[in-house]
Amino acid sequence: MRWYLIYTKPKQEKLAQENLERQGYVCYLPIIFKEKLSHNRRHVAKEPLFPRYLFIHLDQASSGKSWSPIRSTKGVSRLVAFGAEAAVVSDHLIDLLQSLENSSHHPAPLFTPGEKVLVAEGVFSGIEGIYEMADGESRAMVLIEVLSRPVQMKLPKTNLRKIS
């Protein structure tokens, strides 16, 4: 038995996992907890660590479960392959991902200190700044240049966007 990689249809990782497991396959979908803002509220969302990818445990032997139903499973796009060979994922990597996932349920923060942000709403809309720190549940401390001088400002997190 070895681990392989499946490429899923957009935002259908969980659907593909459920349908494959219903057929008797063993799958693994690494999850990450992310801090999100919606409707001016902060919440924690569970998202796939690798969007559009899912790990599947398959037997290489001819006596093992057939691989052919995988392609036609709802939510699955294809089995990842390099040429004619399916991409093998090491057991060590899967074990490492599972141990990290089990030990960390703290959400990834929306912004990290020192990260460039854009003020998207409000009086300072369109101005770039540097995120310094969270200031409570819904506000952030941002360093903005005003009249050629850096000024610390407290702004709602919902007014900020990451600069790619």
Image (cartoon, rainbow, N blue to C red):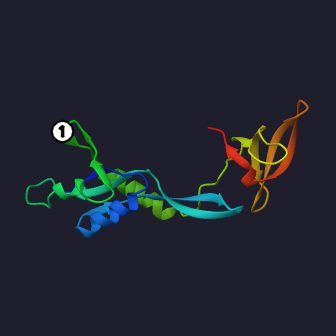
Within 10 Å of disc 1 (Cα), the crowding (few <14, some 14-19, many 20+) is few
The spot of residue 70 in percent (x, y) is 23, 56
Side of 153 where 35 appears, left or right? left
Which residue is located at x 20 percent, y 41 percent?
A: 85
- The residue type indicated by label 1 comes to Ala
Side of 144 where 95 appears, left or right? left
Side of 2 where 43 appears, left or right? right
The spot of residue 155 in percent (x, y) is 81, 51
Taking the view exactly as shown, the residue that stands out farthest to the top is 148
Q: Which residue is mark 1?
A: 84
Which residue is located at x 21 percent, y 35 percent?
A: 83
Q: Callout 1: helix, strand or loop?
A: loop
**Front position in the image: 56 or 71:** 71
The spot of residue 103 in percent (x, y) is 50, 63
Which residue is located at x 39 percent, y 57 percent?
A: 13
Side of 157 where 92 appears, left or right? left
| The image quarter in which residue 156 lies | bottom right
The spot of residue 67 in percent (x, y) is 17, 55
**Front position in the image: 66 or 76:** 76
